[in-house]
């Protein structure tokens, strides 16, 4: 490696390869040249220089015969890579890469090789969260707390929206943006509030205005909000080709941002305009960042992936209301556990005349509308 050049991934792999095949110091070197007759399944080397640098050297049989799982292989790779990083940086004192930059690179590589969230053990999940928290500190200089709380048994979340009470203030929209670390550059929103003409059908949102800019409530208008409805039969889940989105036991449909390939099939399948695609890496000023995050919720996303409302999973699984419901100044939003007979959401469903959007699609959204 030339002095002054940053450590690259190819450098790391080259070092790992040399270390993996180097014989212990207390053992004589293995013979060079072609494989001996009957030397396993490996074919003889055609020609060969005898130096071992062209691949003509016989591999260490003990290394090839050793059985290990994926984690063991990755541990060997990254362990040797870390040693290689220290050795190479010692030989290159003029390298521009700092210790923190090298640490961030190694953490990013390990993140790249991790599996789908649903396939992780509890130990895997904890290690992943530790890496992400450390990366946030190294790369952005912020301290975040990423939660991995799982769905609670005997809990299925539901939402109800009181059209009579909503005045179109959009406090819910602003609270959602702040709580869920949405991209400021593109003014991304999970929630849309439609201003509807008084003579329009309540489910005819095609004739609603979600970009009004005037004093509210407007005379003769009513307001209706949409977001992810957490369908019991979510079509977005069915079309995902890589299993990057799924429904949790508490009814929340989530996305593994690190598994999403950005095909946007889920966006095409959703009839409620609930999903957002990141064309660029979301921008959130450090002073506005919400550090209280969830692995499947409002943690940092990246470009080329889809995200969506999760009923503020970082809050709801802690027994709090979603940010939109808490911020509503008129009490138009009702959230709770559908399995709790004493919850407010159950009272609404049992005592009000409710309806859902596009019920003919049989998506069974867990989001209802009602009037006083």
Image: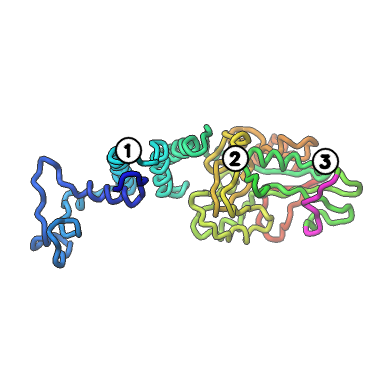
Q: How is the image coloured?
A: rainbow
User: What residue sits 16% from the left and 51% below the top?
Assistant: 60
Quadrant in the rendering for residue 204: bottom right
User: What residue sits 78% from the left and 36% below the top?
Assistant: 331
Give coordinates of residue 139: x percent, y percent.
49, 39
Q: Helix, strand, or loop for circle 3? A: loop
Q: Identify the residue position indicated by label 1 in the image.
A: 93
The tag on residue 313 is: 2
Q: Identify the residue position indicated by label 3 in the image.
A: 165
Stretch in magenta: 206-214
Give the Cα distance between marks 3 and 2. 25 Å
The mark nearer the N terminus, 3 or 2, is 3
Q: Does the rendering let one see residue 366?
A: no
| Left or right: 312 as drawn, with respect to 359 | left
| Left or right: 272 as drawn, with respect to 129 | right
Q: Helix, strand, or loop for circle 1? A: loop
Mark 1 closeness class: few <14, some 14–19, many ≥20 residues within 10 Å: few
Q: Does the rendering let one see residue 168?
A: yes
């Amino acid at each position: 490696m030339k002095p002054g050049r940053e450590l690259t991934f190819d450098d790391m792999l080259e070092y790992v390869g040399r270390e993996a095949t180097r014989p212990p110091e207390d053992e004589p070197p293995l013979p060079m040249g072609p494989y001996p007759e009957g030397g396993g399944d490996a074919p003889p080397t055609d020609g060969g220089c005898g130096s071992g640098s062209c691949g003509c050297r016989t591999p260490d049989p003990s290394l090839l015969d050793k059985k290990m799982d994926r984690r063991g292989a990755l541990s060997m790779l990254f362990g040797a890579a870390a040693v290689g990083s220290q050795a190479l940086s010692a030989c290159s004192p003029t390298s521009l890469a700092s210790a923190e930059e090298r640490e961030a690179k190694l953490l990013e590589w390990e993140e790249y090789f991790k599996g789908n969230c649903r396939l992780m053990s509890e130990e895997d999940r904890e290690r992943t969260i530790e890496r992400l928290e450390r990366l946030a500190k190294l790369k952005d200089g912020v301290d975040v707390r990423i939660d991995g709380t799982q769905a609670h048994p005997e809990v299925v979340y539901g939402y109800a929206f009181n059209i009579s009470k909503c005045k179109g203030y959009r406090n819910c929209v602003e609270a959602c943006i702040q709580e869920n670390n949405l991209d400021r550059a593109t003014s991304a929103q999970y929630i849309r509030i439609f201003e509807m003409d008084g003579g329009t059908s309540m489910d005819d949102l095609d004739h609603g205005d979600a970009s009004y800019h005037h004093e509210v409530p407007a005379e003769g208008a009513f307001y209706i909000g949409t977001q992810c409805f957490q369908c019991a039969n979510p079509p977005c889940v069915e079309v995902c080709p890589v299993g990057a989105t799924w429904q949790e036991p508490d009814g929340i449909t989530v996305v593994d941002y690190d598994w999403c390939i950005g095909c946007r099939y889920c966006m095409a399948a959703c009839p409620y305009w609930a999903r957002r695609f990141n064309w660029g890496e979301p921008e959130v000023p450090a002073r506005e960042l919400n550090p209280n995050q969830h692995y499947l919720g409002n943690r940092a996303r990246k470009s080329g992936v889809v995200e969506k409302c999760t009923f503020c999973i970082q809050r709801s699984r802690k027994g709090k209301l979603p940010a939109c419901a808490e911020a509503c100044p008129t009490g138009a939003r009702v959230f709770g556990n559908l399995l709790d007979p004493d919850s407010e959401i159950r009272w609404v469903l049992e005592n009000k005349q409710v309806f859902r959007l596009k019920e003919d699609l049989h998506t069974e959204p867990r989001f209802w509308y009602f009037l006083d």
